[in-house]
Amino acid sequence: MSLKKLSNRVVIEAFCHATEDISKVKQALLNTIPPEIRDKIKLTTENLKGYFGNPITIIRADIGDSSKASLVVKYLVERLGEDDKQVINDTLDLRIDGSGNLYLRLDKQEAYHGHIRLAPFSDDIIKMKILLPLARCDIQEARKYLKSIGLI
């Protein structure tokens, strides 16, 4: 895969509940980012309260630099398994919006262990929003583009 612009922006976020170790959740999120740029990505946190008053921390990486965002997408393409790529292809109409954002739910536990996989039906996830560099973004254009970069 060439080093062309694969994405304009990537936003990655994870919820850390009171029962979780925030350093482990941060590590899981960082494990979705290529090692060579992890120290260049700023993580922000937002403290919230859940429905029952329980503390929840949102950990977020907002990667607006297109070259770094493209490296994240390249890393995802290289590490995501063929079964997960097929699931993305099969459910693309549910994962993409009219603005060219692709939404993925990654397994937080697997990410902590260094594996990038789509999440099963669970809330223990890392959310990834990838802004695709497309002039127009209908489902056919998105599918064509994602096939060209190897994400489906």
Image (cartoon, rainbow, N blue to C red):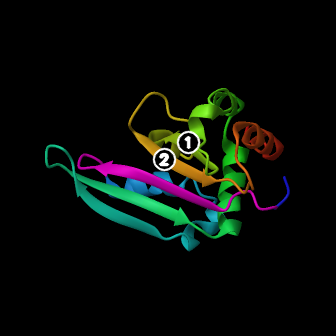
**Camera-nearest residue between 114 and 148:** 148
Q: Residues within 10 Å of mark 1 (few under 14, many from 20)?
A: some
Q: Looking at numbered disc 2 in the image, what kind of residue is underneath it?
A: Lys
Return the x and y of residue 146 as percentages of the image width and height. Answer: 75, 43
* In magenta stretch: residue 14: yes
* In magenta stretch: residue 152: no
Mark 2 and mark 1 in contact (Cβ < 8 Å)?
Answer: yes
Is the residue 9 above or below the residue 90 in the image?
below
Q: Which residues are magenta?
A: 4-20
Return the x and y of residue 60 as percentages of the image width and height. Answer: 44, 60
Q: Secondary structure at mark 1?
A: strand
Residue 137: image tag: none
Choose the circle earlier in sequence order: 1 or 2: 1
Return the x and y of residue 126 as percentages of the image width and height. Answer: 47, 46
Q: Is residue 74 left or right of residue 62?
A: right
Q: Residue at x 74, y 54 (%)?
A: 134
- Pointer 1 residue: 104
Q: Residue at x 59, y 44 (%)?
A: 97
The alpha-carbon separation of the residues under discs 1 and 2 comes to 6 Å
Is the residue 26 above or below the residue 85 in the image?
below
Return the x and y of residue 121 as percentages of the image width and height. Answer: 44, 27
Which residue ends up furthest to the right in the rendered image? Answer: 2
The answer to whether one can see residue 117 in this image is no
Picture quadrant where residue 52 is located: top left
Q: Looking at numbered disc 1 in the image, what kind of residue is underneath it?
A: Leu
**Camera-nearest residue between 151 and 38:** 151
